């Protein structure tokens, strides 16, 4: 059907109405309506993208300025509602970084302020991130600074980013131009949840979820607490690659709060990470006061 002749039947016989319809059709039927459909992010004009990013609160270092190309700019706008819905979660960090071309390889919580450094009660709020970048992308100091600000926008308020690292695969031609193919470099990763693991006073079993890219091990299955009591922690694990469970138990605690750090290593001996174990001592204030009063009365009577 000729679109020029689609007019109301009541005026279809009117020559003036038909002429006007054909004039409008000649002028407007070939218009590209995409610029008027700004919320169809996949097809809207590129000039509208900065305004959409500002409207959905992903402009600047919140996402739009981190995008390397127009497709990533469109993707961060389309993901903006979900990112703000889950703002402050590990998922938001992973999804935001992936959208702008920096997929997260490792996001580890409960780490020390300095890698493999001394532990602190505040470690539960610290985390580190390792992202992957395309091998052809040159990462500058300014890029690292921007990505840190980007990650800190999507983290929660109580967490502190203590380390941000980049991983890039090496191209064959960079160091072995005569070889047509080679195996990909193997990246060893480890995630421990929860870390630290907290045992109660009786030391009943706690389960720790360990996800590793390679087989791993712990040098011993029994570690004595450093408080000199002779009490010990017992570990049960398989050490398989993938996601497995580590079972942690302990002798009862009758002294005071205590803590230890255990190294988790790859089968090759390389250190993958650490697990902190602590055991609380929940004093019963009523029982302590009652015992003190009883002993005092007994002494007076004797």
Image (cartoon, rainbow, N blue to C red):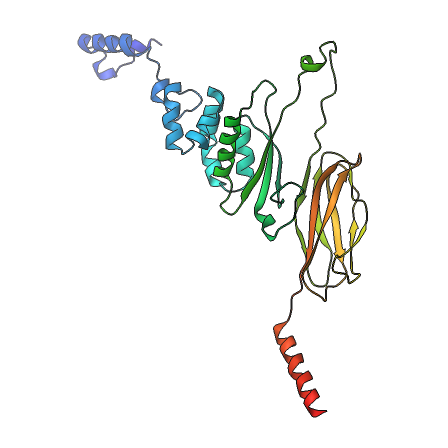
In this view of the protein, which residue sits in the foreground, 224 or 22? 224
Q: Quadrant of the N terminus?
A: top left
- Left or right: residue 252 compared with residue 152: right
Residue visible at 78% across and 44% down in the picture: 218
Q: Position of residue 206 (x, y in %)?
A: 71, 54
Task: Decide: is 215 above or below 20.
Answer: below
In percent of width and height, residue 159 lies at 53, 45
Out of 266 and 52, give the one closest to the viewer.
Answer: 266
Direction from residue 13 to residue 126 in the image, left or right: right
Residue placed furthest toward the bottom: 301
Give me the residue at 49% from left, 22% from top: 68
Give percent across and percent down for residue 244. Answer: 74, 42
| Left or right of 244, for residue 160 | left
Q: Count numbered badges in the picture.
A: 0
Residue 57 occupies quadrant: top left
Residue 45 visible somewhere in the drawing: no
Q: Is residue 52 above or below residue 128?
A: above
Q: Name the quadrant of the C terminus.
A: bottom right
User: Does residue 83 appear anywhere in the picture?
Assistant: yes
Residue at image x 78%, y 51%? 235
The correct choice, above or below, for 275 with respect to 175 in the image is below
Residue nearest the viewer, comparing 243 with 63: 63
Q: Quick check: 10 above or below 236?
A: above
The picture places residue 132, in percent across and down from the top left corner, at 61, 27
Quarter assignment of residue 116: top right
């Amino acid at each position: 059907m000729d679109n020029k002749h689609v007019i109301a039947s009541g005026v279809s016989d009117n020559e003036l109405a038909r002429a006007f319809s054909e004039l409008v059709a000649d002028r407007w039927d070939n218009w590209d309506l995409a610029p008027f459909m700004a919320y169809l992010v996949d097809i809207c004009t590129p000039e509208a993208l900065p305004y959409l990013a500002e409207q959905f609160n992903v402009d600047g270092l919140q996402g739009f300025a981190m995008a390397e190309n127009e497709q990533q700019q469109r993707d961060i706008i389309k993901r903006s509602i979900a990112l703000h819905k889950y703002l402050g979660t590990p998922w938001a960090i992973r999804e935001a970084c992936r959208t702008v071309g920096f997929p997260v390889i490792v996001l580890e919580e409960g780490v020390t302020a300095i890698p493999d450094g001394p532990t602190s009660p505040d470690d539960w709020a610290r985390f580190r991130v390792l992202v992957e970048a395309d091998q052809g992308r040159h990462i500058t100091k300014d890029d690292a600074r921007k990505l840190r600000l980007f990650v800190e926008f999507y983290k929660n308020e109580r967490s502190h980013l203590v380390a941000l690292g980049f991983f890039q695969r090496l191209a064959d031609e960079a160091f072995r131009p005569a070889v047509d193919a080679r195996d990909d470099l193997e990246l060893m990763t480890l995630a421990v949840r929860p870390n630290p693991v907290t045992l109660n006073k009786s030391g009943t079993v706690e389960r720790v979820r360990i996800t590793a890219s390679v087989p791993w091990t712990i040098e011993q299955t029994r570690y004595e607490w450093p408080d000199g009591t002779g009490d010990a922690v017992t570990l049960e694990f398989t050490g398989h690659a993938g996601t497995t469970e580590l079972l942690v138990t302990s002798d009862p605690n009758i002294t005071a709060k205590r803590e230890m750090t255990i190294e988790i290593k790859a089968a090759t001996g390389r250190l993958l990470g650490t697990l902190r174990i602590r055991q609380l001592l929940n004093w019963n204030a009523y029982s302590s006061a009652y015992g003190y009063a009883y002993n005092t009365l007994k002494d007076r009577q004797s």
